Amino acid sequence: MKLIYFIAMLASMLLLSCNSEPSLQKYFVEKSEDKDFVALDVSPNIINVDKTKLTSEQKTALESFDKMNILAFKLDEKNKAQYEIESKKLTTILKGENYQELMKIGSGKDGASISFVGDEDNIDEFILFGKKEDNGFAVIRILGNDMNPNNIMNMISILQSANIDMEQLKPLEGLMKK
């Protein structure tokens, strides 16, 4: 009888300790195999740049970048209802207490937002979420160590002059053809 009681207590503790709050990471895992989504993990080697020509701030920004996770939903005639459901789920997740919105562009059916996880001096991830009613949406998680807004601005300047390895982005080609 004590064994059954012990197992029941252990099971209830495990169930109670599980965090049921939705997160972007959980959403990515759940949707990565869904036929309506394209999921990609992009490594830092996508950025081909001569590191000797970078400023120290740009080098620091590049070193803070670990990887990018991209999840895109391609809208078509058959999945419009699903698009609305998934778009609302993402909006709800990004309004959670772990995510701090930096900027929002557009409104309603078309728009984009930039959010982050962490604090302003030590950002764990930046999240870019954009949607366009006639194409679908994409959410990008930029993961790194000790990132800050200056690092992101420096990353943008690096990307403008970098030779991007487009092979890693091949799966997204179908989304851009509309």
Image (cartoon, rainbow, N blue to C red):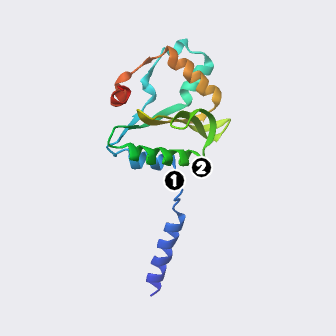
- Which type of secondary structure does the marked residue at label 2 adopt? loop
Pinpoint residue 58: horizontal percent, then vertical percent: 58, 20
Question: What is the count of numbered marks?
Answer: 2
Left or right: where 79 falls relative to 137: left
In the rendered view, tell whether residue 36 sits above or below residue 60.
below
Say which residue label 2 marks. Answer: 96
Pinpoint residue 10: horizontal percent, then vertical percent: 49, 73
Residue 40 visible here: yes
Say which residue label 1 marks. Answer: 22
Pinpoint residue 107: horizontal percent, then vertical percent: 57, 35
What residue is at 33 percent from the left and 29 percent from the top?
174
In space, the residues marked 1 and 2 are separated at their CA atoms by 8 Å
Pinpoint residue 159: horizontal percent, then vertical percent: 50, 20
In the rendered view, tell whether residue 156 sits above or below residue 11.
above
Left or right: where 12 falls relative to 72: right
For the residue pair 167 and 102, the one nearer the viewer reads as 102
Left or right: where 110 falls relative to 37: right
In the rendered view, tell whether residue 124 sits above or below residue 43.
below
How dense is the environment of label 2, judged by Cα within 10 Å: few (below 14), some, or many (20 and up)?
few
Quadrant in which the N terminus appears: bottom left
Q: Are circles 1 and 2 on residues that touch, CB within 8 Å?
A: yes
How dense is the environment of label 1, judged by Cα within 10 Å: few (below 14), some, or many (20 and up)?
some
Could you tell me the amino acid type at mark 2? Gly
